[in-house]
Amino acid sequence: MCTRSRCCVSKAAAGLAVAVLMAGMAVAQDVFSEEALAAWLGPSHLMVHLRFDQATTASRLHLSFPHAMQHLATALPLKSAELHLTAGRWRYGEWGWPLVPAKPVGAVLDASFVASASSPEAGGTSGGGSGSDSGDAGLEAHWSALVAALSGLSCASLSLLREPRSVGEGHTRLQDLEAGRANASGVAGVRRLRALLPHEALCTENLTPWLRLLPCGDQAGLASLLRHRPTVFGAEYVSLGLLLERGAVSEDRPGVRLVQTATFVVRATAPAAGSGGQAKGAESGTGSAAAAARVMLEQALRAEVEHACPPAARSLVFVAEPREEPAAVVAAAPAAPLTPAAAAAGSCSASAGQADGGEGGVAAGSCTSLREAAPAAGEAVEQEGPGVREQPGAGPQGQQLALWAVSAGSTHHGLTAARSPAVPRLQVYDTLDLLDARGWGLHLPLPSPPARPVGAGGGGLGSASGGASGALGPAPVAVERYVTGAGMLRGGMVLAVRRSPQLRERLRVAAAEAGGACAGAAVGGGGAAADGVCLLEVVCVYQVFPWYIRPWLHTLSVLYDGQPVPLQRHLVSRHVRPATARASPGVVDLCLAASPDVSELRLRLDFSKAFLTAFEYPPDAHRGFDVPAALVSYVEPLALPAAQWREGDSGEGQAPASPLLLALQGGAVQQVYTPALLVPLAAPDFSMPYNVICLSSTVLAVYFGATLNLVMRRGAGDTAGADGAAAAGGAAGKAAARRRRLRKAVQAVVLLVAFGALALYLDSELREQAEEWLRGLGLEVGSPKPLLGCQAQGTC
Amino acid sequence: MAAEERPVLPQSRRRLYAIGFLAAYVLAVLPIWYEAVRVPRAPLPHDDIQALEEEVAAPLAGALASTVTVYVLCAGGTYPCFKYNELSPYAEAVGEEILRQLGKTSEQVPLVVRVVHDEKGACSTSSWDSEGLMARQRRSSQRRDSGSGKKAKAGAKGGRVSNSGSYYDAAAAASSSYVGCLSLASSQQRLTGVLSAADRALDDLAAKELGGQGDRPGHYVLFMLPDLWRLGGDLPLGAVGRRRFGVVRYPAGGLPSAPAAVRLVGLLAAPAFASHLGDPLDEAALSAARAAAASDPAVAAQLADEALPLPVSPAAQLHLSFSLCNAHPSPHYPSHTLRAAAQASGSTAKQDQDSGARPPAAASGSFAAFAWDFAAFEAQFVGPWKNALSAAARLTVSSQVLYFTPARVNGSWDPQRAAFTVPHASLPFFVDSSWRLDPSRTGLPASAAADGAVPYDLATIHSGDRSSAIGEVVLPPMPPAHAPGRAVAEAAAAAALPRLLPPRAAGSLPPAVLHFVLFAPPPAQRPLLLLGPDGEAAPANSFHVPGWGMLQVLNQVPPSGAMMANVREDNMEEFAREALTQLRLLLGLAAARRRLIQHNELHAASSPAASTTSKGSSNEDAPPPVGRIELLTDLRSGLAPWEADALLRRRTGADVAAAAATLGSLARLLRQVPTLALPPAAGALVRDAVAALRRALAAVEASNYMDASKAAQQARSWAEAAFSDPALSTRQNVPDTHLVGVYLPFCLPAAVPLLQALLHEIRRRRRKPTAGVDAQGTSGVGQTLSGEMEASEGEQLIHTEPNTPVKANDS
């Protein structure tokens, strides 16, 4: 069973970079490659995705790798760190499913550290092992060092992430469920931390340092597509990404890899067919009339690629062809067998996880259906092929790429290939060739934009074809999250996940193909992540609550299609960690099984809001507090195992080793971020501190006064005793005096205890100090840890 | 009265309570208040710091002495030799001459001149200490004596020449720390071998003969050799060797004490062996230098360079960042750039364009971006610099290649030179701040043992719970694991490590960065020529900016059509040479070398005329003419050990002064700003710095270069680290009124009942002698201050009433 996950992809990509390194080694220790992807999302929306890959094995003598990143990677026991800065929301409803995963608004930082004990110190031979065995403290120090470095390197105010209110540690990933690691926060020896900062604004000051990390900045290469800043930052969705990874090429050669991505959706209008002749740069195009009617890529971005970046080993532009019209697919006779084929492949991917790109075949035993289905699908594609091929014929020298699933089972030839309908075809252009041939400027014609928004499509007709969704189609899953309730004390949160009919159809077919194991697990699946659970049906929700939002887990209710269902019956895995005030956020990580018939999952949860101290409020206290985006993951059956991008229409030809394509290929597990949420919290009167000082001082004064009074008072009993003593001087008087004294002492003790308890209740610092003292005295103070632990394990 | 005893008891007990509570209140509240208000501050050795400051303020406190041994070889036979009693005057004369050449007085220079006279069968020595050195010794012995309670006796001897010149054997010489007798004249064969050796061979020979004792920092040997093949009228010749040797060849007919020979010794020793770079000049020298500077801009620039602080961080870190900048590795020019270039080149360029002198579009074909093999370059050139300078500063190196880094200044076409020229005045604006040069603040690049070709290893330090790479340790290449030399190499590496590792606090002090840029101009501006201040082409087509680094233009034309090309070997070599020259300049080392070389130029200029003028004007003041001076260069590193020694002297002196100043100002700062916190870690650093400074001063007196420099570096970096502690920069500005305002609401209400009770008791006590019954009724009770007090007073009122019967009883 392949239990690999998304990190598998990155590993494969890293391996690829390494392969490049080894190939071109000897002299150049740094490699750099750049790629761009352009796709229409609607009649006026163009998505451009840039990806810059740098890798190095050198330590300080670099050709193009930025020293700062190298230093960061060596100074910290980092395995990987990923930072995304995003402005604007991805409109799933309009733009459809993103080709590259969309990120939530603000900053997302995801880092995994090598646990210090087994840390492979890169080259640190004379320095010895790192001294950070202190676990959490060390991790915290590393995290804050990383945050400080990254905020300096990206000019972002990430320093707020150092506050513990949003840093969560690892979450259950759908892919891990199978291996029974539902509780583990990841691979052993690696600790993952992630934090979201929803109100971080992205602007030019972030882009400039980001560009400085590139060998040519925005002066040359594909990065010069970003030169017109008003276009970039006027875009409706902009996301800058930075991924730093550390690996080892071999035993003694550590390697560092830096991936920078920029995704943005710009508003671009295609010129009308008549006015196209006047379009800038059209005269130099090859196909005059056909090309003139199209928008040029550079024109849409108002920037020109003038020079090639010399260190770039690869500089490619991918242009997504519009999807085939559903009509063509429907018209093709064998459309029916196509669906089960794809679905079957999906089931395999679901059960087998995501196979490594290099593995080729499918090893899983349950995936027998693919062998029968694949040829049929192959035929289907080959039949429909000629119809499609004419369309991009007008374009210049680009090659065509499509995602093909290759299976080892052979009926016709040695290898059969089925083209994945989930991903569009791509037209590839080599920038270096273009610049060489043409002088400057790429003059890449874009295909004509679709008539209507990609995401708005679908409808009843498309659902029958099954292939019309997925990437660059209507979103298969819609996620919604909102706050209910009024008032400053309590509230509720609702998270709704809607599956599109197409997805349900695919899931149903896939589940049917996968057979009994799936059904059995679905029915009998208790709470635990038992072996054989059908991952197709599982939907995972990962939500981090800042500590001042206190969810009440007993109020958690699950509704399937509006009907409440018992949570326990559908729970596959659960990882709940309550928040610690001012120390760590709460984490709710649930995986639910929902049969393909369920079209809407709805989770409701009530929470109460905490009161913050005056100094914990941000300057704009009345804006409300951000609740970070939730992450919903599910299995997309269409993602194929062993899929490769191949040239041509029949799937032959060498697979181009491109990191961007590998990333596009994605995995079976899809992840969607919900939009961020604002929760209003009671804002205090900010002159509070002095009031508090006065109030607490008064309380203390009352305490002192009362004690003093108590001790110094001589009540009626006193006089009686004194009289008695004076009069009789007997034993009775003495006893009375003793009793009196005793009573006084008791009163004093009661007073002391009462006020002490009050002080302890009010002041957490005092509480901690008291605990410290008690611990110093050798007393075992019950800490809340064990309770949390049992909750974390889901046993209580 | 016996009846009175009983009621007194509760009263006195009450008093006791009141006083007890007051005491308890004071005892409990004051510490709490003090703890809350107190500024945490580690104790500082204020007295030590002050004493050290005074000690360092004394002249020549941190100045390392240099010992120049003039080794006079007597040829014997008919050639004249020194008599025994001539040695001391000779030593003095040499010392005076060196001082004259330095332009300083005897009090300003710590200098020891020793004369070793090697005659066949016998050696005699004599030594001369400069006044400054003796004064320092006197001071230290005084201090020692006053410390131990004795009266100062030593140092009263006025004589500066301590003539130890007795005949002694070789064993005694070996035991002494100074260069002893080599017995070069023991046999005729040996003697002729030495006398006939060429400069370079003599250098090697001396290194071999002296073994370890001669090649120590601060100890220089100057051989006075009679030149048997030259006549009496000839001028003496001199050479400065590649290590710590020099040689003066005087005509064999004369004595080594001939004025010309002595002057040549001074000329050699003053800049090379005895100079203290960066010293504040005295008035006379300063005015002379100013006059020279006024006439010669080069001298002015040199003086400016020398006066600048060294680009070395307080922790003695220096990072060399090598960048290869490709200004425009592309055949295409956007139209606006071309236009700008045309405008910049001005009207003359336009005319030249018409006349066709301008190279027409040679750019379009050969536009390749340059790359270099820096690993090999470093191993060949930069590595030896690191080794040579390792005692004075820890050098680290990184390299990168940049693309599309246009200069901010465009060259203008000069038809005479057939090149684009950039005038000297616009060179400061040449480098664009948008070039992605290594920033200094991201820390040092970590070097891992990535490529086996370069013998570097990574040194990490642990700061807190995080280890950070701090520098590169230069270690010799290790033999393979089971080779015979492995153990020896490992031991050597282990011995070298502590010297090369930075001090503990270096992590918090960023290194100084020097940039070395090799700039490939855009194809359309090739060849590019930088002009010097005099309007001529700058030497080696480069310029330097003090404290920043240097830039050299690479005018290599790449093969046409290629995308990438390598920088040619000879260009790399030239870059290395220029980088070294500029590094020497940036480190303030160039002056000595330049002075030695300039002497030759002066000599060449004046020698034809010299003979006539010296005869004609035979003035007493005119210095006797001397011959040429040869300057041997270390082939491998290019930096001679005596140059590194000079840097060491300067660095040690500066470090000692800076450490004392930093400690002093820290102490003063803490004394003046009482709200400044000093964490215990910083306090420990200060104590360590004080100890290291003491060690450094002791080592300076013992003229132990290595220990002194190491201790001085430690002292300075620790002092700086303590001073730059974050706790000191974030001063909590809490005014006193605030302290009172916050704590008064607590202290005051709690104090009121106590004070009231006290008042009550006092009043009662005062009235007691005239105790009346109604006194009880008005015993300060009814007046209440606050609502809460009212309640307690009320209770008091209640419980005072029962007392009345007691009193009534009394009455």
Image (cartoon, helix red, strand yellow):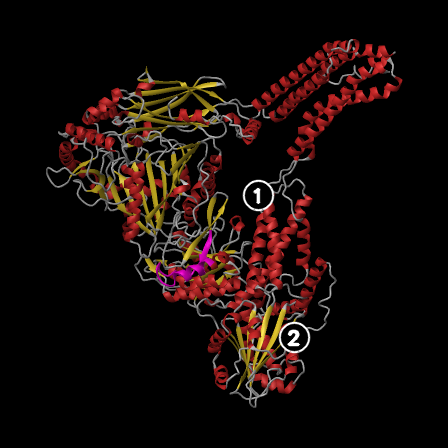
Question: Where does residue A181 sit, x and y in percent of width and height?
Answer: 32, 31
**In the drawing, does residue A294 fall left or right of residue A65?**
left
Q: Quadrant of the N terminus of chain B?
A: top right
Q: Residue at x 67, y 41 (%)?
A: B674
Q: Where in the figure is residue B357, as x and y percent of width and height?
A: 39, 67
Q: Chain of mark 1?
A: B
Q: Residue B772 magenta-drawn?
A: no
Q: Which residue is mark 2?
A: B96
The kind of residue on which mark 2 rests is Glu
Q: Which residue is mark 1?
A: B726
Could you say which is closer to the camera, residue A14 or residue B498?
A: B498
- Of all residues, the one furthest to the bottom in this rendering is B78
- Magenta stretch in the rendered image: B470-494
> Mark 1: which amino acid?
Pro
Label 2 with label 1: CB-CB less than 8 Å: no
**Residue A153 seen by the camera:** yes
